Image (cartoon, rainbow, N blue to C red):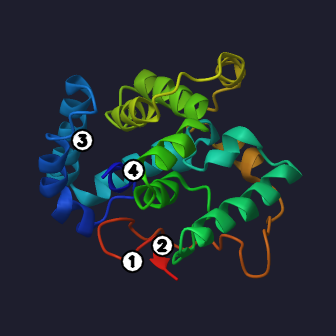
């Protein structure tokens, strides 16, 4: 459900949003206040103009590295460690009997959440806990933007049952928050060579597929 809510808005997501809202209301492990905001987000996605929803999504998550939904952007940046981390994460997917069926990189958060959804609860919680500091920082940044997407990260932090590492969290809080309206700075930030993580593995910039709503979407059984 949380993977779907974080996905790029599509007509399929709009069609499923009512069912998603209904499912959220019974998830007692998520605080009531957070559930209410998630339900509101689902209804926004259901009733909003699709082009407006897509523009809002791009403004939030694609035009600002500080709000990127690619987890390793916040952990490794553009260091060489990111490439190996991508390979390792993909191998974890394959070990779970899953393989990528989209053009997204393995660290794309909705994709990662789909992977967690097929794991035993304790293993999923342990995997989610690894990113606790990223989830908290993104929750804070989205809350400052006044967007209901912040509730998705609040829910994930609750499900992780882990307090973020304070040193790592402070490091993220100290990072520069880029301004998505500063187009010159945006061009400079993304003006870099294509990074490949193996033969044919580079993100080719194709439109996102929508996770969870249709099976298979981001991942398929191997």
Residue 12 lies in what quarter of the image? bottom left
- Verify CB contact (< 8 Å) between mark 4 and mark 2: no
| 42 sits left or right of 64 in the view | left
Q: Residue at x 25, y 38 (%)?
A: 38
Question: Which label's residue is closer to the chain start, 4 or 2?
Answer: 4
Query: Which residue corresponds to mark 4?
Result: 6
- Verify CB contact (< 8 Å) between mark 1 and mark 4: no
Q: Residue at x 77, y 46 (%)?
A: 188
Question: Which label's residue is closer to the chain start, 4 or 3?
Answer: 4
| 30 or 205, nearer to the observer | 30
Using the image, determine if residue 86 lies above or below residue 149.
Answer: below
- Which mark lies nearer to you, 1 or 4? 1
- Verify CB contact (< 8 Å) between mark 2 and mark 3: no
Query: Which residue corresponds to mark 3?
Result: 41
Residue 157 on image: x %, y %: 45, 31
Element class at badge 2: strand
Question: Which label's residue is closer to the chain start, 1 or 4?
Answer: 4
Using the image, determine if residue 75 lies above or below residue 54.
Answer: above
Residue 96 lies in what quarter of the image? bottom right
Element class at badge 1: loop
| 140 sits left or right of 174 in the view | left
Element class at badge 4: loop
| 35 sits left or right of 201 in the view | left
Disc 1 packing (10 Å; few <14; some 14–19; many ≥20)? some
- What whole-number distance in Å separates the C-alpha atoms at marks 4 and 2? 16 Å
Question: Which label's residue is closer to the chain start, 1 or 3?
Answer: 3
- What whole-number distance in Å separates the C-alpha atoms at marks 1 and 3? 24 Å
| 93 or 70, nearer to the observer | 93
- Verify CB contact (< 8 Å) between mark 1 and mark 2: yes
Query: Which residue corresponds to mark 2?
Result: 219
Using the image, determine if residue 205 lies above or below residue 36.
Answer: below
Query: Which residue corresponds to mark 1?
Result: 216
């Amino acid at each position: 459900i949380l993977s779907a809510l974080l996905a790029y808005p599509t007509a399929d997501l709009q069609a499923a949003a009512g069912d998603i809202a209904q499912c959220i209301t019974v998830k007692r492990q998520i605080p009531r206040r957070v559930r209410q905001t998630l339900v509101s987000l689902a209804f926004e996605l259901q009733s909003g103009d699709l082009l407006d929803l897509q523009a809002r999504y791009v403004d939030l998550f694609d035009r600002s590295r500080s709000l990127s939904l690619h987890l390793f952007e916040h952990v490794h940046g553009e260091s060489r460690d990111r490439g190996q981390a991508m390979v390792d994460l993909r191998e974890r997917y394959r070990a779970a009997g899953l393989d990528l069926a989209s053009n997204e990189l393995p660290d794309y958060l909705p994709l990662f959440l789909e992977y967690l959804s097929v794991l035993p609860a304790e293993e999923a919680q342990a995997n989610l806990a690894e990113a606790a500091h990223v989830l908290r920082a993104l929750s804070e940044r989205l809350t400052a933007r006044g967007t209901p997407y912040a509730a998705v990260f609040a829910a994930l932090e609750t499900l992780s049952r882990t307090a973020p590492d304070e040193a790592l969290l402070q490091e993220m809080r100290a990072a520069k928050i880029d301004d998505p309206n500063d187009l010159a700075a945006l061009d400079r930030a993304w003006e870099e060579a294509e990074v490949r993580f193996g033969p044919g593995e580079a993100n080719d910039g194709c439109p996102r597929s929508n996770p969870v709503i249709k099976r298979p979407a981001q991942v398929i059984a191997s």
